[in-house]
Image (cartoon, rainbow, N blue to C red):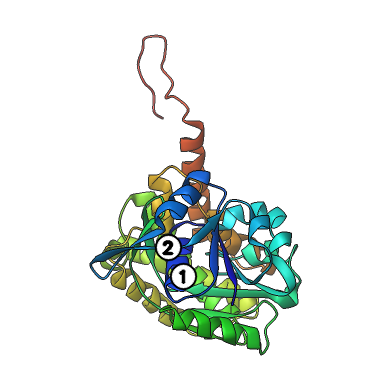
Amino acid sequence: MKTAIIGAGAMGCLFGAHLARAGVDVTLIDIDADEVATLRARGVRLHQDGRVSDVAVAALTDPAEAGPADLVIVFVKAHQTRSVLPGLPPLLGPETRVLTLQNGLGAADVLAEAVPPDRLLVGVTAQGATQLGRGEVRHGGRGETLLGPYRPGPDRFAQRAAAMLTGAGLPARAVADPWPPVWKKLAVNCAINPVTALTGIRNGPVAAWDPARELAADAAREAAAVARAEGVDLGDPEDLVGFVTAVARATAENRSSMGQDVDRRAPTEIEFICGAVVRRGEARGVPTPVNRTLWRLIRTLELGYRTAAPIPEDAHGQVHDS
C-alpha cells in the first residue's frame, strides 16, 4: 500500500520509520526543508527499547513529487490542518483514502472540505513519541490505533490499513464507528493537556495531586456530557474519570504534547480540544465552565508569549505586574 505521511513531527516520524522498516512504500512530506534534508541524509533516528537506529525513509517538501498514494496519513498539528489542503490534490488518486490521527475534534471536518467524505478515515492512536531533534524521536508509550470511516459503517479499506499498521509493529484495529474513541481521547486530552501545560507538571501529578485530579475530572465530565448531547455515549462519566486517572498514571513521566508546545512557546491545539468542547457545548446547550476556563487560560498564555509585551514601568522605574 503506497502511503504518504503529511507532517514529519514526532508521530509522523514514528509511523514513517515503522512502516519503512516493514517494507512499506512510504514517503514523509513536510514543509520544513531542513527536516526533510535530515531525513534524506540519515533517515529517522529512532530511540526504542534502549536502542538507537537510523531508518531510511523517503522525504519530500513538495507533495506533487510524491504522486498519488493509496493512503495519506495526516499528522500535522490540528491547527495546521487547513494549510495541508492545497497540497492534497497531487496525492489523491481515484481510490485514495485520507486518514487523520490528529488530536482533538474538528480536523476531520476541515479535511472533508477537500476530501470526499466517503474517502476520509478518522482515528486515534495510543502510540506515544517525543521529538528529540530533526528527524529524531523517542518511542514512548505503546497502545492500539483505532480507525474507521468519517461516516460510520463497515469499511474494507480501513481493515486493510489497520492490517498494514499492525504488520509494521503498530497494533491497529478498524471500527465501524470511530467517533466514540475520538470523543474518549478528546476527554482525556481536555483533562490532562491544559492542566499540565498551565502548571508545568508532568502527567503523573494529574493522578496524584488532589487539585489537579479534581480539575481534570471536571473537564472530562463536561466532555462526556457534550458527547452525549452529540449522540455519542461514553458510558458512566465516573468510569471515564477513572480512565483519565489511569492514563495519567500510565504516562506519569511524560510531558503532554500541549505542555511541550508551551515549553517551546509554540501554538497549541487548544482550539481543537477544550475549544471544541466549548463550541459543541454551546450548540447543544450544555454548560462547559471548566473547559471554557482552561481554553481561555491557554489562549491567554499563548498571546503572552506571542506578543512578548514588556512589563510596564512607572515614571520612577518601578515595575508593575498587576
Quadrant housing the C terminus: top left
**Mark 2: secondary structure:** loop
* Crowding near the residue tagged with mark 2, few <14, some 14–19, many ≥20 C-alpha atoms within 10 Å: some
Task: Name the spot of residue 155 as percent of width and height, x first.
Answer: 66, 87
Residue at image location 65% in from the left, 56% down from the top: 65
Spot occupied by residue 106 in the image (x, y as percentages of width and height): 63, 64
Looking at the picture, how far across and down is residue 30, in whole percent?
A: 55, 53
- Is 27 above or below relative to 124? above
Of residues 18 and 277, which is closer to you in this image?
18
Query: Which numbered dot is residue 56?
Result: 2
Q: Compared to 169, does 156 lie above or below?
A: below
Residue at the extreme left:
50
Around disc 1, counting alpha carbons within 10 Å, would you say few (fewer than 14), some (14 to 19), or many (20 or more)? many
Residue pushed farthest top? 316
Seen from the viewer's position, the closer of residues 133 and 223 is 133
Q: Quadrant of residue 288?
A: bottom right
> What is the x, y in percent for residue 129?
38, 63
| Res 126 quadrant in image | bottom left
Amino acid, disc 1: Ala
* Lower position in the chain sequence, tag 2 or tag 1: 1
Image quadrant where one finds the N terminus: bottom right
User: Which three-letter amino acid code belongs to the residue tagged 2?
Assistant: Ala
Residue at the image position 44 percent from the left and 21 percent from the top = 312
C-alpha distance separating marks 2 and 1? 7 Å
Measuring 58% from the left and 51% from the top, which residue is drawn there? Answer: 61
Q: Is residue 292 above or below residue 235?
A: above
Residue 9 appears in the rendering: yes
Left or right: where does residue 134 sit relative to residue 124? left
Residue 275 vs residue 173, the one in the foreground: 173
Q: Is residue 76 visible?
A: no
Which residue is labeled 1 in the image?
20
In the rendered structure, are the residues bearing label 2 and label 1 in contact, judged by CB atoms less than 8 Å apart? yes
